[in-house]
């Protein structure tokens, strides 16, 4: 039963891939310089370039585990971005990625395949030195500092407004006492 459902899901995914790739646009070039960045145990970012002047309105990415027939298809339209996050990856696993450009008239040919391996979590932790600070840690500290700064500014503005009002009241009282009757 599970084997039939899995086969049907794989077949539907394959048919969706074929339907997008079967309408090739003559004017679109395959994406260039496809690279993997920010590689972690369970995620990565794929980036690419396109030729200047290509009327691209989106992209399609195919992601596949090496030596496994299962395929993930990601499609985005109405975007000019040249990167995409790959998520829910398994650590210490090889993947193959292709990128296609999408225009109003169809899709480009597939990019050259990019093969990469996700690291083991232990490799990631071992490569971090005790003095190394991650972006997550920096981001949390920056958020805390920004929040503290907002509170300090609000308190100072309220205090300054209170003192201006108090000084005006004192100067009014002083001028009434000093003015001749």
Image (cartoon, rainbow, N blue to C red):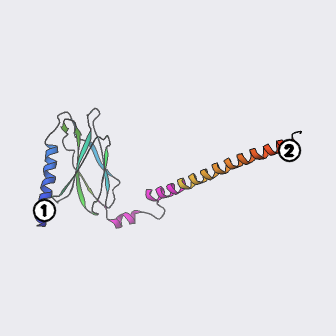
Q: Please, what secondary structure does the residue beneath circle 2 have?
A: helix
Q: Extreme right residue here?
A: 180
CB contact under 8 Å: marks 2 and 1? no
Give the x, y percent position of residue 80: 31, 40
The majority secondary structure of the magenta stretch comes to: helix
The residue at 19%/35% (across/down) is 105
Q: How many marks?
A: 2
Which image quarter is the C terminus in?
top right
Q: Please, what secondary structure does the residue beneath circle 1 have?
A: helix
3D distance between C-alphas at marks 2 and 1: 93 Å
The residue at 52%/57% (across/down) is 144
Give the x, y percent position of residue 136: 44, 58
What's drawn in magenta, residue-wise? 118-145
From the image, tell me which residue sits under label 1: 5
Which image quarter is the N terminus in?
bottom left
The residue at 27%/38% (across/down) is 57
In the rendered view, tell whether residue 141 sits above or below residue 16: below
User: Callout 2: few (<14), some (14-19), or many (20+) C-alpha neighbours within 10 Å?
Assistant: few
Say whether residue 151 is magenta.
Answer: no
From the image, tell me which residue sits under label 2: 177
Disc nearer the start of the sequence (2/1): 1
Give the x, y percent position of residue 98: 22, 48
101 with respect to 146 (left or right): left
Q: Quadrant of residue 52?
A: top left
Give the x, y percent position of residue 37: 33, 52
Say whether residue 132 is magenta.
Answer: yes
């Amino acid at each position: 039963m599970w084997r039939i459902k899995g086969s049907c899901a794989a077949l539907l995914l394959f048919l969706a891939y074929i339907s997008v790739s079967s309408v090739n646009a003559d004017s679109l070039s395959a994406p260039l310089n496809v690279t993997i960045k920010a590689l972690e145990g369970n995620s990565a970012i794929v980036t690419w370039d396109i030729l200047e002047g290509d009327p691209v309105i989106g992209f399609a990415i195919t992601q596949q585990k090496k030596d496994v027939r299962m395929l993930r298809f990601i499609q985005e339209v109405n975007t000019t971005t040249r990167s995409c996050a790959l998520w829910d990856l398994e650590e210490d696993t090889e993947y193959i990625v292709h990128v296609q450009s999408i225009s109003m008239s169809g899709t480009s040919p597939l990019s050259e395949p990019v093969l990469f391996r996700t690291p083991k979590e232990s490799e990631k932790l071992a490569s971090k030195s005790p003095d190394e600070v991650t972006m997550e840690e920096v981001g949390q500290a920056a958020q805390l500092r920004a929040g503290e700064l907002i509170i300090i500014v609000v308190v100072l503005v309220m205090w300054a407004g209170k003192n201006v009002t108090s000084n005006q009241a004192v100067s009014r009282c002083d001028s009434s006492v000093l003015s001749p009757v």
